[in-house]
């Protein structure tokens, strides 16, 4: 039985040696993996620093762009206010033109009788002037007395025209 005991101790020693070798191989493999992970993390860290730097620059540019948009928006607001003021001015001008045209229309309606009377008198005057010219052209060689007598005879047609104009007015 002693031999079994020595043999058992020898088997345990060999098993322990195999176990140690296995653990050592696993730890060595794990060390290589950890070195690889360390290298990857170092690269990742440098890339992350680059991304962080670019993100910071992008954020800065975005802030500048937002400020520029804000300024342009304020400038555009002044243009909008100016256009609105022009619209109010045009509307006021339209209202003034409406009032003036309305007052002119009212005055024309009120003075329509006077206007028609002036037109009738003007027409009568033009007719008299035309008749007088026709008489002058027909009798250019008559002495002044004959013209005077002739013009005194024309008073009656002129009076008829004036009476006719007055009757239109009434």
Image: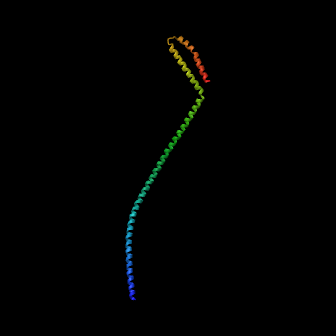
- 80 to the left or right of 26: right
Question: Which colour assignment does the render follow?
Answer: rainbow
Q: Nearer the viewer, residue 5 or 117?
A: 5
- 68 to the left or right of 96: left
Q: Position of residue 107 (x, y in %)?
A: 59, 30
Q: Position of residue 82 (x, y in %)?
A: 50, 43
Quadrant containing the C terminus in the rendered view: top right
Name the residue located 52 percent from the left edge and 39 percent from the top edge: 90
Q: Nearer the viewer, residue 56 or 165?
A: 165
> From the viewer's perspective, is residue 56 above or below residue 12?
above
> From the viewer's perspective, is residue 33 above or below residue 54?
below
> From the viewer's perspective, is residue 46 above or below residue 24?
above
Q: Residue furthest bottom?
A: 1
Name the residue located 55 percent from the left edge and 13 percent from the top edge: 150
Q: Nearer the viewer, residue 8 or 125?
A: 8
Name the residue located 41 percent from the left edge and 59 percent from the top edge: 51
Which quarter of the figure has residue 148?
top right
Exactly how many numbered labels are in the figure? 0
Q: Nearer the viewer, residue 7 or 67?
A: 7
Which quarter of the figure has residue 169?
top right
Q: Position of residue 69 (x, y in %)?
A: 46, 50
Name the residue located 39 percent from the left edge and 61 percent from the top edge: 47
Quadrant containing the N terminus in the rendered view: bottom left
> From the viewer's perspective, is residue 102 above or below residue 33?
above
Q: Position of residue 102 (x, y in %)?
A: 57, 33
- 151 to the left or right of 16: right
């Amino acid at each position: 039985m002693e031999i079994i005991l020595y043999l058992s101790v020898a088997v345990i020693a060999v098993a322990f040696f195999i176990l140690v070798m296995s653990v050592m191989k696993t730890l060595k493999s794990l060390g290589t993996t950890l070195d690889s992970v360390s290298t990857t993390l170092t690269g990742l860290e440098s890339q992350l620093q680059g991304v962080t730097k670019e993100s910071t620059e992008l954020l800065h540019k975005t802030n500048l762009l937002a400020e520029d948009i804000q300024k342009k928006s304020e400038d555009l607001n002044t243009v909008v206010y100016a256009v609105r003021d022009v619209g109010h001015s045009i509307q006021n001008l339209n209202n003034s033109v409406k009032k003036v045209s309305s007052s002119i229309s009212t005055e024309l309606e009120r003075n329509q009788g006077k206007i028609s009377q002036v037109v009738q008198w003007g027409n009568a005057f033009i007719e008299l002037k035309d008749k007088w010219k026709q008489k002058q052209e027909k009798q250019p060689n008559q002495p002044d007395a004959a013209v005077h007598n002739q013009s005194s005879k024309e008073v009656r047609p002129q009076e008829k025209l004036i009476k006719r104009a007055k009757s239109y007015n009434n």
